[in-house]
Image: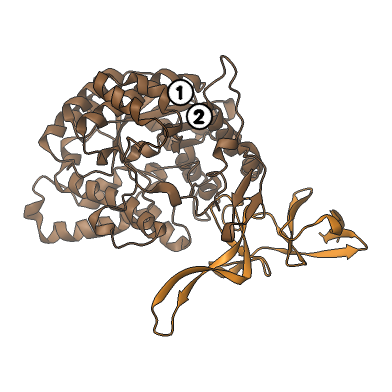
Chain colours: A brown, B orange
Amino acid sequence: MELVAERGRRVSVEELNTSRLLAHARKQAVKRNFDDMMIVDVDAHHYENECMDEFIPFIENDVIRQLVMASRAKGRGSVIPSVAVHFQDMGGRITRYPLRSSEKTDNSEGAKGRDVQLGHRWMDAMSVDYSCLFPTLMLAIGLHPEVDMEVELCWAYNRWLTEKALIEGDGRFYSMLALPFADPEASMRTIEEFGDRKHVTGFLVTSVRSQPVHNNANMKVFRALEERGLVLSFHSAINPMEPVFKSLNRFASVHALGFPFYNIIHMTNWITNGLSERFPKLPVIWIEGGLAWVPFLMQRLDHQYMLRRSEYPTLKRMPSDYMRDMFYASQPMEQDDKIALENTFRMINAETQLLYASDYPHWDFDLPSAIYDLPFLSEKAKHNILGGNSARLFKLPPRNEAQKQNLIKYGNYTAA
Amino acid sequence: MAEKLVGKASEFKDGDRRIVIAGEKEVGVFKNKGEFFAYSNYCLHQGGPACEGLTIAKVEERIMPDLTSRGLYFSDTDMLFVCPWHGYEYDMKTGECVSNRKLRLRRYEVVQKGDELYVDL
């Protein structure tokens, strides 16, 4: 294949082979005995826009299904709102984007789906035992102007995920399913239909949206999750059309601010309106905003709370105390200043609250070594963050005896 | 120091690159504007295959004397190679990470004997 380099010069490259691309990840895993350590990736992705034809038939409403099928014709726009992800690959510098379609997978009768095969390749390279599989473009579904379309697409995708992809994953994929959060009644129906399904550990609010989490209509949704022992996660993304971001002229700027921004908005509403007091047993995870925003917000909210307590009547503790009880996905971990990062780990109780995330195959993925090689972490903290905390939270079993012994050693064995 | 055969110099076209593996060592050998360069293939960021991605000219911004910007352009002089994992950019001539020139890939000498190219490991 050819990639386009500067001034349109074409550069010949071999087809993409994920195992080969990640050969150095495999070397790192062997050197660090990662196979003996249970590693759970709380945020990995596939490109559902490339398998939409598989899940569109699950759309229940005849008219919307016909609309979506018609939109698949060449030259038509996407039914999922675009968040201008086209520059993620930096002009092809991240080669797995332009080369993705060149990767060969087994498409013979009875073979596992392409996304499952690709997922197992990168998981094996990194020594990841379990991956929480999320979509990519659907993370912007909260921007869709038609609530019915959000409801139908989430429903269809969740059926495909739980009836095909997760089933084919040899027990190594799990997921937190997207809620059609614009419609609390539909969210309830989603929880009731999918909450007991295999490999479903919780539900997801796609964070790029403007609905307030503290809307009274959502309380039954959070209560349903808490009663079932499920997890609620918020997965952020970007939206260059957000009015406050319209002046940003580079993808890097939109990305740097956008991911933390949506989590900051929802976290602020969650804390300020006392949802942690109302749902004390509901585990909440904040995914893909990095970590640096958390100390910032802890300090901002604590300061406001001390001066303006009358606006926080439901709180019994400092905002940062509630935030310390929550869980955080590690990627993309800002680690150029190790002293600042160590302080962040201290402020969020990383040893028990931080969950390793790769975000693979997206452009800014983190390997398990990004956690393992941190100079300030104890062995227990490394084991906990890379998999032990997730093993406890999602009740995931070890995949070999060495992992079991390590889980027992560090108090993370749940015998799921 | 051991020399490892890279290949025939005459078979290298400008812009070509090869990866030489010797045990744990991996070295990327590039030919750029008639010169050979060789660097460690382990990215200083997260250990990706630093020499196996795109080679591409450095992007610059045209800032005018009145300090206004007239957009971006590709440098005529500075060629980079880019780690395909995350996009860390390295200077072809020095192996320095362009974002932070305190970071530099290990450089290896390229030795030509007749038509044969070797890297000095």
Instruction: Compute the Cα span from label 1 to label 2.
Output: 8 Å
Q: Residue furthest bottom?
A: B65
At x 64%, y 43%, the residue is A1
Task: Examine the rendered structure and indicate whether residue A121 appears above or below residue A85.
Answer: above
At x 21%, y 39%, the residue is A145
Q: Is A156 in front, or is A198?
A: A156
Report if the CB atoms under discs 1 and 2 are less than 8 Å apart. yes
Q: Where in the figure is residue B33, as x and y percent of width and height?
A: 73, 67
Tell me the SS state at disc 2. helix
* Residue A56 found in image quarter: top left
Q: Which mark is residue A115?
A: 2
Task: Examine the rendered structure and indicate whether residue B39 appears above or below residue A78.
Answer: below
Q: Mark 2, chain letter?
A: A
At x 58%, y 33%, the residue is A121
In the rendered structure, which disc, 1 or 2, sits on the residue that comes first in sequence? 2
* Residue A124 found in image quarter: top right
Residue at image mark 1: A165
